[in-house]
Amino acid sequence: LYFYAQEGILFFYHVKGLQYEMKICADILQPISSLIFSPDYTVLLLVTDQGTVYTYKPAHSGEAVKLLDACSSCFLAADFLTPGNKYCVSVTISGEVQVWFLEDGTCLSKLNLDIEVHVT
């Protein structure tokens, strides 16, 4: 079970029977707004309240890596493009939809919806 705390800490609870172990996986020092697993569960996207997107690979137990940083408009949400986990799509508050290559954070495509976006 992965979950996050308001302070930007990613936690992992390993539950086995009536026993559990809690582990701090990453501290990104920004409040996290959402977690999204890739379809094959090898990569976790962390989207922050400030609009930054990080990747975390549970099997590697390393630090979260900053993939995308908010520029003119904060990223409101991100998700994986399927099949696979090579690409993600994001949307900004200003309505810009972008497709990203996860390996190096390259923006491959963008579309402006010309409308302010909200998440409920």
Image: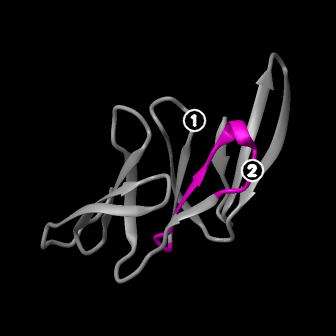
Q: Residue at x 48, y 38 (%)?
A: 38
x and y, in percent, of residue 100 in the image: 37, 57
Q: Is residue 59 magenta?
A: yes
Q: Residue at x 50, y 68 (%)?
A: 52
Q: Amino acid at mark 2?
A: Gly
Residue 21 is a magenta residue: no
Determine whether, in the image, residue 85 is placed left or right of residue 54: left
Residue type marked 1? Thr
From the viewer's perspective, is residue 34 above or below residue 107? Answer: above
Q: Say whether residue 120 is left or right of residue 39.
A: left
* The disc label shown at residue 62, or none: 2
**9 relative to 82 in the view: left or right:** right
Q: Residues within 10 Å of mark 1 (few under 14, many from 20)?
A: few
The span picked out in magenta is: 50-64
Q: Residue at (40%, 63%) from the top-left corner?
A: 106
Q: Quadrant of residue 96?
A: bottom left
